[in-house]
Structure formats: C-alpha cells, structure tokens
C-alpha cells in the first residue's frame, strides 16, 4: 500500500494541498521583479579624476599609475583597467568577483584612493577624485534637440543649461541609476578668456589673474555682531553677511588686477572677457538629421533591476517633457528594457503555446476529456507554484526562469500521464476507479519518485557553480527543480485522486457539433491571446455578450442559443474595438478551432488506426532487435563513438548575440585632426544611416569614445524600429550592421568607421564579439610605437585567418603633438622662476580651474584660459609672457623651443600594464569559442617576447568557463547514477538506464549542427537536461521489467513485456514534451537565438532518444542480466506469475 492511497480516499485534502500551491504562486507573480537576465555582470567601481590641461602621458604618470598602484589588490578584485586621456581625464574601472557587495567594494576602493591622494598633483586634488559604484551597461540613451531650427533657436549651451537645471539631479535620484553621462553637454561654468597681448601691455601675466581670482572670489565666514562670548547686557546678536563670491559676469569683469603708476585701475575686462560657457568643449553631438543636440547616457547600477530603473527614469523624463519650451524635443535612441520586455513576451508566448500543444497531444492520446483534465490541471499547478519558490529563493522573472518553465511544461505532465494512463487501463480490466487508482500507485509510486529524482539529480551539481556561468545554470536549473518537485508531489497526491474521481463514471462521447463549438471557443480565446496585449481585456465583454445572447435565446424560446451567444460575443468585441484593431488572429483561430473540432472524431479514428499499426510494427521490430542483440550492441558502441566525434565538430560558444534593437558605432579619424573634422565624418555617417529603412533614430558624438575621449574619435548609437516593424532575416540588427559596415568601408573621407552589435550580456564590454587585451610586460623595453606595431602585426595576421571576421583596434600612439624643450640656464639668467613659467604656459594653453562660485542654485566652476585665437598655432607662444624677479615681463619664447612630435591621445592599462585592446568578431558561421582559439594561436605562434595577453568583456567569462560544461555534464551523470543506484540497490540498472544518454546527445548535436548553431551555454544546459529526459523513459521500462522478473519472468520476457506495456506512456510523455519544446525551437524575434539553441538541443535529443531507447534499453537489459547470470529470473514466493500479454491499453 502506497502513501498515495491516503490522498485518493481524501479528495478534499488533496484539493486543498493543490489550491494552496496555486494561491501562493499567484501571490508571488506580481511581486517578482522582471529582467532579461539575472545580475551576471561583475560589480564595478569607477575612479575618475581630472588633471586640467595635461596630456595622456602626464595623466598616466602623475595620476593613473599613482591611483592604480594603491588600488591594485583590493579585496575581491578580479581585474583593473584604466584610460589616461589627452583631455586630462583619468578613468579607472575596478571589476570585482561576481556576488560581492558593491557597497563594500566602493568603500574598500575609497580607502585605497585616500591613501594615494597625497601623492597626486595639487590641481587633481583640488578638482577632486570621485569613487562611485558603476556599471558598464548603458541602460538608456536619449537625445535633446532643437526640433525645428528654422522656427526656434536653442544653442547647445542653452539646452545644456536647461538640462542641468531641470533634469540631471532628478535622474540621478532614481533608485538604481549608476551614472549619468552627457555627450555634447556644455555644463555651465564661468569662463575667463584672456588676451595675452593685453596682459603684457598692462604688465600682467596669466598667473597674476589666477592669483587675484583666488584672492577675490572666495567664501568668507564673517561672524556675528554681539556673538558669544559677549559683554554683560548685550541685547542682540546679528549675523554678518559678507559678499566674497562673485556671481555675475559683470562682477568678474570688474575684478581689479593691479593699480597703474598713474593711479588707474586695470580690471579683468581690460585684458580679456568673461562669459557663461561650458566646463568642457571636447564633444559635439547631433541627431540622425545632423541637427546639433545634447545626448545623455544613463548607466544602470550593478545589482539593480533594469525595468524598475528604466521606468523610474522614464517617469522623470515624462514630467520633464511637460516643462519643455516649445521647439525643444526629446528623442529616444534606445532603451534596453524594450528588448527585455520583448524577449520576455516571446518566451511567455512560447510558454503559452507549449501548454496548449501539450494539452492537445494528451487529448489526442487519451481521447477522453476527463482523463485529459488530470495532466492538464497538473501543468498550471506545477508552473504557478514554481513562481512562489522562484520568489522565495530571491530569483527574478527572467529569460532563464521562463526557459525553465517552458521546458518544465513537458516534464511536469510525465508522471500525471503515467498515472492516468495506467488507471484507465486497470479500470478497463473491470476495477472500480478508486481500486484502479490505488493499484496504479502501488505499482508506480517508486517509479514516479525515481524518474523525478533522476530529472532533479542531474541539476543538483549545477546549483553550486560560481561566476556568471554558474548564475546562468543556477536559475535555469532551480526553476526546473522547483517545477518537477511540485509536479511530483502533485502526481503522488492530486493526480491519482482526480483520476479516481473523474473516471468513476463512463465519459459520454461528445458529438461532432459539441467538438466544433468547443473548438470555436478555444480558438476564439487563443486568438484573443495572440492579438496583442489589449486583446485579452476584450475577453470579459465578449464573455458577457455571449452570456447575454445565450440568456436572450433561452427567454425567447428560440432554438438559436449558439448563434445568439456568438453574436453577443461579437458585440462585446466590437465595443472594445479589438475586432477593428486586430481581428485577424481572432477570426483565424476561431475558424481553425471550428474545423479541427468538427473533424475530431475522424482524427481520433485515423490516429487509433495508425497507432494500432505502429504498435504491431514496433512489436515486430522489438522481437527482431532482441534476437540481433550483438548487432544492436555494436551499433550502440558506434553511436557512442559518433557522439564523441560530433562533440569535436560542433564549435563552442558562450551566449548567442541577440537582436537587441540597437547598435553601437565607433569613428577613428586620423590622429591630430580637430573635433570639427571628426564632426564632419559623423555627418557622412549619418547620411549613410539615413539610407537604412530599419533605423529609427541615432545620436552621433564627435570627440567621444567608450575607451577614452579624444578629438579624432567618434561614437554613435543607432536605434532600430520595433521588432514587429522589421520582420525577416534581412532586417535584424546583425543584417543592418553588416550592410552599414559594407557601405561605410572606404566611403568615409579620412577616417575608419566600425559598427557592432551590443554585447550579449549587458555590462560585458562595449560590443558583441571578443576583446583581446595585448599587454606590455617588458618593463619599458617596448616603446609605445613598437608596442603598437606588434598589435598591428597581430591584427594583419588575424585578417587573414578564416575564423575571424572584423578585427581592429582604436588605439594609436602617433597623434601629432608638439614638444617643448626648456632652456633652464637661459630661464635662470633672465630671472624667471621655473614654476611660474610652467604655470603661465599651462593656464594659457591648457586652462586652469581656479575655484567655485554659486549661481542660480548651482555650484559653478571658474576657469581661466587664453582665448581661442591665442592658442590656434604654436607661433602664438611668443605672445605669452611671465614676470621675472625684476618685475619685467619676459616672453616664454626666450627659453621655450617648440618641436613637432607624436604621442598617444589615450593610454590604456590592464592590471597596471600598458595595454592595447584588439576588438573582433567571428567570421559568419564561426563561433566565439573558435575566434578566441584563433587569437590564442596567433599570439602563441608569434612568440612575442615581453608581451602577454588577457581578455575582457564577455570573452573573459567564456575563457573562465573553459571546460566547465564537461565538468557539469560529468557531475550530472554521476548524480543520476548515484540516485538510481540507491533507488534500485543496484549498480547495473543505472548503467542500463544511462546508456540511452549517448543516443540523446547524438540527436541533439545533429539537430544543432544541421541548424548551423554552436554549442553555447544554452545548448549546454539542454544537454544536461537530456540526461534526465532520456533516463526517464528508460526507468519506466527497467522498473516494470524488474517487477516482472521478480514475478518469475525471464529477462527476455520481462524486457519484451515492459517495452510493449510502456510504449504508449513513453510516446505520450515524449511527444507531449516534444511539442512543448517546439515553440522554443521555432522562436522568432527578440531573444530567438537563445530560445532556438535550447529548443534544438532538447527537441532533437529527446526525439532520437525516445525512438532509440524503446529498442536499445530492452536489448541492453537482456544483455546485462545475462552477463550477471540473472537472465532466467526467479520464481515468485507464491508460485504464481505470468509474463503474458501486455496490459490492455485504452483506445
């Protein structure tokens, strides 16, 4: 007597248990956070500082290296990268191990930075070093633009000021925003532009101006009149206000710099001009039409939920747009949550279709609507209950958990199918429904637990793997474990009770008309579900209309209830507007439902005829293979060898690149060109992009890059039309990127342009493909030029490699520059202080951040610099003077000699080494794993002394994962073997069961290779899952065969009987699972690559394993029992036993 009998005899208890599972799951669904993938990207802390006017080498040596050496080795650090730019910016990114606390990481880095700050230049300390949690993942990109320049005039400065005043702070306050970066923004600052000739004429230098500003623009605490301690009898205490800061351009212009010998005053306006300008001028932005704009990129904080952050930012933007002046517009370039929502929608649709297909297959096999209800009800109970456990374990509703639910759809019905099928068969033998259910559970209780444990055991090792790969495996595996666990409980409690209850009476056969009506109703509902998000809301008025029509027909006594009901439903639909907005799915599926319903009796008849013939042919084939056991075993051995060979032929990968609805581009203009020239290249790029109909928007930035800004660099973001507006392979992001690269190659005057797809996992790198970091570990043996030449050698070799597609670097050490030699002896003879001369030159050419003031509720910086004309050519050096010890003004040209030179605009580091990042993509038809292998081979064959390499971006995770899939697979098989060994108290039965796994793997690899897919991480997950799927079928055969041998049957008789008896439930569970996998395999649109990779593996593997295992398992069972000397079986204790005909099956 099994434990299930208690639930069979207590239907209320069984129902309550299932209802509780469903209720808890329903409560969890709206609470679950939604995202594309779990937080996989490593936590990152960014350290940014500015050395105004410094070149890249000065920033590297004076700032970046000082900070890096202190930060290096901070707790839980994985690697550290940095960029030292010629615009004076030092940007350091510290990446930490996955799973670490971002707040703790930030504190640890801040402590290290504090230790380094005393060693930094004074100018850097004064401007400050920021340490923030950051993410490499850009969540949103928007453009702010003058919509109609012919009617309204909004300069970039005006737009910048408006954004700074009304938007920036509000966006930064949104929970989960890591950083807000503007492109082309002119953040307001006081700019003091000096005329060096007027300074000299007034016996002043630029350093004198800086000194006066520091003295006269300062915040001074003035104290109080009558403040404590006060004399006895003091009657009042008044605060004194002292205006120390200057807050208007007029006040700055009227600063007194010196007094002339005649008693006159020299003011700032006498030697220059003051304006409200921008803090920086290095980046210009424009939209797809070429209109000047200001772009904003919003970064997501590591560990936050993308959809919640995006919704928060969009709420702020919606309020902001209400306040915009006429003519100032907002353009959305891209929003990564659009892809998240679309991909989640795609997987949800796959889940919906999987459930429907599985139920239809069950109905086809069972041909009894009551019997079909048993496994049909098991699906929502298991899936809805899973949501509660997903929430309880801190997971989110993402692609991985939904993939798990889609695959679980076919799995959770397996046990319920077996229960209802066996109960139906025993009831057909004359038992009552309750007796049949109890007898079934006595027989199947162990098998249900065994098959469930096998399916669950294969995923248990996965739960303990660390890193990004472990996270992907973990959420997927845990979801399946949850659903299988609930379905097993359901199969042992609710399903047998429901079978006994529903099968207690004979089911009345439905008429053709009733099937047709049911088909119309189901097709109608499915059509509404397929019509769009708003269509489901039409279901309520449609049902109300149908009910009213039905009641009206009954009241009037007219025999037209069905037409009236359909008419009422139509009226309900019309009132919602659905029938006009998207009527096609509703009409189509209603008609299909009508036709299929009408022909259901014919379908059943033909199916039964076909299955009867198939069963006879199977019995004949089974008899043949059992006689030809040596041949079958040889074929199995060959199949195992072929499986191993197939593994070597299928290329490996990590995460497939998806159509995420946007692309990223990079511009590399010749070194030394101005920002204006790069802006002209961007205009050419925009003109090319306007020829692509699939592009909806773009934001192009000159002087900007994701790897360090420079005047000759450009960056652009491309927003695509919605996925529904660009169906077909020629309209994917990948296809558009390919066409753009072809059009832009050689078409851009004096520049290189690359367009790439975004990384497959947000936060990993700047684009899809690989990121190869070439490292200079020679301790100074290589110059930057020599280092760059070596990188170019690798790139040129890579271009000839058939595995590699695009391969390039955006680094260049040869930007035209000027070098100044200082004659210190001449300087000393002229009485010029070295520091004063250096400061004078730096202020005029590089600019100086002096101090701050306060204006319009904002802190404004104050900068001093020579005007643009005085910095246009190196010859202007002669116009810059510095005071000597005698009070005379001496031109810098007296001791400065200007020479032409070359140098880098950006110097990158990786783990403190100078590095050059080589970006690339695999050739079409090749995998990322093959590309990584090709780059390793190129480097190793080059024998580059003093150099090393490493990886960043998604490539780093792929390399770290290495042979992890093999380890997981091996541990999965081991876990299943141990569970089965414990279950059967035998080491041989598990071997029989697991021998079906190679056939499943072979089928999976054949399907994967035929579709041109690679063995990526989703496909690897599918392979692990196949261990449980293939083993489940074998368990049913082995378990029953063991029971028959215990009754006295021989191994051959037991194998034959069990294979024939279990054929129908094996086919039913397998085909229902296969149909559940179909939506994944045939997925289109956002997220389709991931879905199809997984779907192809599980569909192909289970398809081949099902049909081969029904033949191979009986053969191997007989062979193993013969080898163990157990082929004759043993007689039962009561002396009975009959290995006769198979158990009759319901027709």
Image (cartoon, grey):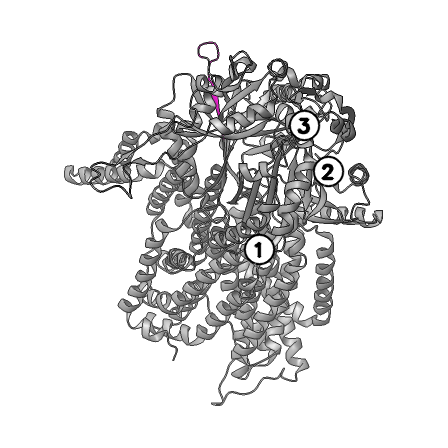
Please give left or right for residue 910 compared with residue 826 in the image: left
Please give left or right for residue 940 compared with residue 922 in the image: right
Q: Which range is magenta?
A: 142-152
Relative vertical location of residue 105 with respect to residue 20 in this rendering, above or below: above
Q: Dot 2: within a 10 Å radius of its alpha carbon, few (fewer than 14), some, or many (20 or more) residues?
A: some
Q: Which quarter of the picture shows residue 1031?
A: bottom right
Secondary structure at badge 2 equals strand
Q: Dot 3: within a 10 Å radius of its alpha carbon, few (fewer than 14), some, or many (20 or more) residues?
A: many
- Residue 694 x %, y %: 56, 26
Query: For mark 3, what is the residue?
Result: 837
Which numbered mark, 3 or 2, is in the foreground of this view? 3
Which numbered mark, 2 or 1, is in the foreground of this view? 1
Residue positioned most to the top:
150
Q: Which comes before the other along the chain, label 1 or label 3?
A: 1
- Seen from the viewer's position, the closer of residues 1082 and 764 is 764
- Residue 1116 x %, y %: 65, 72
- Residue 4 x %, y %: 37, 73
- Which quadrant is home to the C terminus? bottom left
Q: Which quarter of the picture shows residue 219?
A: top left
Q: How many marks?
A: 3
Q: Which comes before the other along the chain, label 2 or label 1?
A: 1
Secondary structure at badge 3 equals helix
Residue 97, disc: 1
Residue 805, disc: 2
Q: CA distance from mark 2 to mark 1?
A: 31 Å
């Amino acid at each position: 007597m099994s434990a299930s009998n208690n639930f069979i005899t207590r239907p209320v208890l069984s129902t309550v248990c299932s209802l509780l599972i469903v209720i808890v799951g329903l409560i969890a669904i709206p609470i679950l956070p939604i995202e594309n993938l779990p937080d996989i990207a490593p936590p990152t802390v960014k350290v940014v500082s500015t050395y105004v006017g410094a070149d890249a080498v000065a920033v590297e040596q004076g700032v970046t290296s000082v900070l890096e050496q202190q930060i290096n080795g901070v707790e839980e650090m994985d690697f550290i990268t940095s960029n030292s730019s010629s615009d004076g910016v030092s940007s350091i990114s510290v990446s930490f191990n996955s799973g670490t606390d971002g707040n703790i990481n930030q504190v640890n880095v801040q402590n290290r930075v504090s230790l380094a700050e005393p060693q930094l230049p004074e100018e850097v300390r004064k401007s400050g070093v920021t340490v923030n949690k950051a993410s490499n993942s850009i969540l949103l990109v928007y453009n702010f633009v003058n919509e109609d320049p012919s009617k309204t005039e909004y300069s970039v400065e005006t737009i910048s000021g408006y954004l700074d005043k009304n938007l920036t702070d509000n966006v930064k306050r949104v929970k989960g925003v890591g950083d807000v970066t503007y492109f082309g923004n002119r953040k307001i600052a006081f700019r003091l532009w000096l005329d060096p000739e007027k300074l000299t004429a007034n016996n002043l230098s630029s350093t004198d101006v800086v000194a006066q500003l520091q003295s006269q623009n300062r915040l001074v605490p003035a104290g109080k009149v009558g403040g404590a301690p006060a004399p006895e009898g003091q009657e009042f205490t008044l605060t004194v206000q002292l205006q120390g800061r200057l807050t208007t351009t007029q006040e700055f212009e009227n600063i007194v710099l010196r007094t002339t010998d005649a008693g006159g005053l020299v003011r700032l306006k006498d030697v220059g001009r003051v304006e409200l300008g921008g803090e920086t001028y290095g980046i210009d932005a424009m939209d797809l039409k070429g209109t000047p704009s200001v772009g904003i990129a919003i970064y997501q904080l590591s560990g936050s939920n993308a959809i919640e952050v995006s919704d928060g930012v969009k709420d702020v933007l919606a309020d902001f747009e209400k306040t915009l002046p006429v003519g100032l517009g907002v353009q959305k370039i891209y929003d990564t949550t659009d892809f998240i929502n679309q991909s989640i929608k795609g997987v949800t649709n796959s889940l919906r279709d999987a459930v429907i297909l599985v139920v239809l297959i069950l109905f086809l096999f069972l041909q009894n609507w009551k019997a079909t209800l048993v496994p049909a009800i098991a699906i929502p109970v298991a899936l809805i209950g899973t949501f509660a456990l997903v929430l309880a374990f801190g997971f989110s509703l993402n692609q991985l958990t939904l993939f798990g639910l889609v695959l679980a759809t076919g799995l959770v019905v397996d046990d319920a199918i077996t229960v209802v099928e066996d109960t139906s068969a025993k009831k057909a033998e004359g038992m009552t429904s309750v007796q049949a259910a109890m007898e079934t559970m006595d027989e199947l209780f162990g098998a249900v637990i065994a098959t469930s444990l096998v399916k669950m055991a294969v995923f248990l090792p996965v739960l303990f793997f660390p890193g990004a790969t472990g996270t992907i495996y973990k959420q997927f595996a845990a979801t399946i474990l949850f659903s299988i666990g609930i379905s097993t409980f359901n199969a042992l409690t609710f399903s047998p009770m429901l079978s006994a209850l529903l099968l207690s009476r004979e089911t009345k056969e439905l008429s053709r008309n009733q099937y047709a009506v049911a088909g119309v109703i189901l097709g109608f509902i499915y059509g509404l579900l397929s019509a769009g998000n708003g269509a489901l809301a039409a279901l309520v008025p449609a049902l109300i209309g149908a009910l009213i029509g039905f009641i009206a027909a009954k009241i009037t006594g007219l025999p037209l209830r069905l037409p009236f009901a359909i008419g009422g439903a139509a009226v309900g639909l019309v009132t919602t507007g659905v029938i006009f907005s998207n009527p096609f799915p509703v009409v189509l599926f209603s008609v299909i439902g009508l036709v299929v319903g009408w022909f259901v009796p014919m379908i059943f008849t033909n199916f039964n005829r076909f299955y009867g013939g198939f069963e006879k042919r199977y019995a004949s084939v089974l008899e043949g293979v059992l006689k030809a056991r040596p041949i079958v075993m040889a074929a199995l051995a060959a199949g195992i060898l072929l499986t191993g060979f197939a593994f070597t032929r299928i290329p490996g990968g990590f995460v497939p690149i998806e159509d995420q609805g946007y692309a990223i581009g990079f511009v590399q203009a010749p070194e030394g060109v101005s920002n204006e020239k790069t802006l002209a290249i961007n205009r050419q790029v925009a003109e090319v992009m306007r020829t692509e109909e699939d592009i909806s928007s773009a934001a192009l930035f000159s002087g900007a890059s994701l790897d360090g800004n420079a005047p000759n660099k450009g960056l652009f973001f491309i927003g695509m039309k919605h996925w529904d507006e660009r169906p077909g392979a020629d309209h994917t992001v990948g296809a558009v990127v390919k066409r753009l690269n072809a059009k832009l190659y050689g078409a851009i005057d004096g520049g290189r342009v690359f367009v790439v797809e975004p990384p497959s996992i947000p936060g990993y790198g700047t684009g899809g493909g690989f990121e190869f970091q070439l490292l200079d570990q020679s301790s100074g043996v290589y110059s930057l030029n020599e280092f760059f030449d070596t990188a170019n050698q690798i790139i040129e070799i890579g271009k000839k490699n058939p595995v590699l597609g695009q391969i390039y670097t955006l680094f260049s050490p040869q930007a035209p520059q000027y070098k100044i030699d200082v004659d210190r002896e001449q300087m000393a003879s002229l009485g010029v202080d070295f520091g004063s001369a250096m400061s004078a030159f730096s202020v005029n050419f590089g600019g100086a951040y002096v101090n701050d003031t306060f204006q319009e509720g904002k802190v404004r910086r104050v900068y001093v610099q020579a005007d643009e004309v005085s910095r246009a050519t190196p010859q202007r050096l002669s116009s810059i003077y510095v005071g000597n010890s005698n009070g005379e003004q001496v031109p810098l040209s007296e001791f400065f000699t200007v020479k032409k030179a070359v140098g880098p605009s950006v110097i990158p580091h990786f783990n403190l080494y100078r590095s050059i990042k080589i970006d690339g993509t695999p050739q079409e038809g090749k995998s990322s794993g093959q590309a990584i292998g090709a780059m390793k081979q190129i480097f190793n064959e080059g024998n580059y002394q003093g150099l090393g390499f490493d990886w960043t971006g998604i490539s780093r995770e792929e390399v770290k994962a290495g042979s992890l899939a093999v380890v997981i697979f091996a541990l999965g098989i081991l876990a299943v073997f141990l569970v089965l060994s414990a279950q059967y108290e035998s080491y041989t039965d598990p071997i029989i069961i697991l021998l079906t796994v190679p056939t499943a793997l072979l089928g999976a690899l054949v399907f994967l290779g035929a579709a041109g897919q690679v063995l990526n991480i989703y496909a690897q997950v599918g392979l692990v899952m196949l261990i449980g799927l293939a083993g489940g079928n074998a368990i049913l055969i082995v378990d029953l065969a063991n029971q028959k041998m215990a009754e006295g049957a021989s191994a051959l008789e037991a194998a034959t009987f069990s294979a024939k008896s279990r054929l129908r439930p094996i086919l039913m569970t397998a085909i229902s699972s296969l149909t559940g996998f179909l939506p994944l395999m045939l997925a289109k649109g956002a997220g389709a690559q991931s879905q199809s990779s997984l779907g192809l593996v599980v569909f192909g593997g289970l398809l081949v394993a099902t049909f081969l295992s029904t033949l191979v398992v009986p053969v191997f069972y007989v062979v193993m029992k013969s080898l163990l000397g157990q082929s004759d079986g043993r007689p039962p204790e009561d002396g009975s036993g009959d290995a006769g005909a198979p158990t009759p099956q319901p027709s």
